[in-house]
Image (spheres, grey):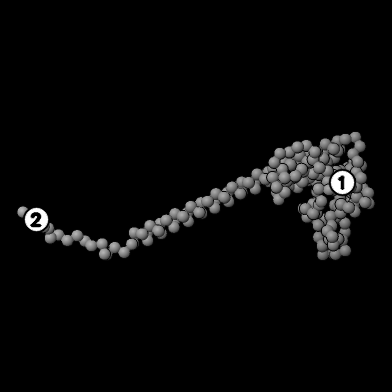
Amino acid sequence: MVMFSSHKFPQAAGQRGAALIVGLIMLLLLTLIGVAGMRDTLLQEKMAGNMRDREIALQAAEAALRAGELELQGLNPSFPNNSGRYDLASATGKNLMKRVDTNGKLVGEQQFWSQWDWESDAVAYTKSLEGVGEAPAYVIEKLDPQVSQKSEYDTVANPNQVVAIDLTPGDFEAETSVPDYRITARGTGRTTDAAVIVQSTYRRE
């Protein structure tokens, strides 16, 4: 005898792809999370690379600064008012190293040295350094012993412009007989975009 069941199975006509839509939404969310994670990783990598470049530039500038100090320990350092060596006791040196822009307006140290020609008007560091875009360099200024304790900024015609206050040489009578030397050094990282400028004042014994 053959038995037939009268049970009816549910038909698939009622399914309309809801699971597919939910799956696509979840896939989109996972993709967005993955892209955001990649962007964050790349940003962190760039930040670490920039910090490394700056550290390399700082160390290169410090090496050039030390080279300038060693040069001053020589018997008769020369200051011909060119090629990175200037005597501010002379009118030529003082005029060349005056902190002014092309319009004659006083500028700060940062702006002055950022516009300096470090390739042709500075002393190049001769020792080999790895990981730098270009060799560091330094500039030495021999300060006038009579005004070494005063500001190099002269009085300007514009009364509204802020200038440094000069100190009288009598305030430093014990120090005016010995000149000071201002050394400014510049170093770069793996690229010239990462540049650090450091400065020190040195007095020979």
Secondary structure under badge 1? Answer: loop
Instruction: Answer left or right for 3 relative to 78.
Output: left
Q: Position of residue 29 (x, y in %)?
A: 44, 57
Q: Residues within 10 Å of mark 2 (few under 14, many from 20)?
A: few
What's the distance in space between the residues labelled 2 and 1, CA to CA?
A: 111 Å
Whether pointer 2 and pointer 1 mark residues with C-beta atoms closer than 8 Å, the reply is no
- Going 69% across and 41% down the picture, which residue do you hit? 131
Instruction: Answer left or right for 137 relative to 81.
Output: left
Q: Quadrant of the C terminus?
A: top right
- Going 9% across and 55% down the picture, which residue do you hit? 3
- Going 81% across and 52% down the picture, which residue do you hit? 116
- Residue type at mark 2 is Met
| Residue 26 position by quadrant | bottom left
- Residue type at mark 1 is Ser
Residue highlighted by disc 1 = 83
| Residue 132 position by quadrant | top right
Residue highlighted by disc 2 = 3
Secondary structure under badge 2? Answer: loop
- The outermost residue toward the right is 91
Nearer to us of marks 2 and 1 is: 2
- Going 44% across and 57% down the picture, which residue do you hit? 28
Q: Position of residue 137 (x, y in %)?
A: 79, 44
| Residue 172 position by quadrant | top right
Q: Which of disc 1 and disc 2 is earlier in sequence?
A: 2
- The outermost residue toward the left is 1
Q: Which mark is residue 126?
A: none
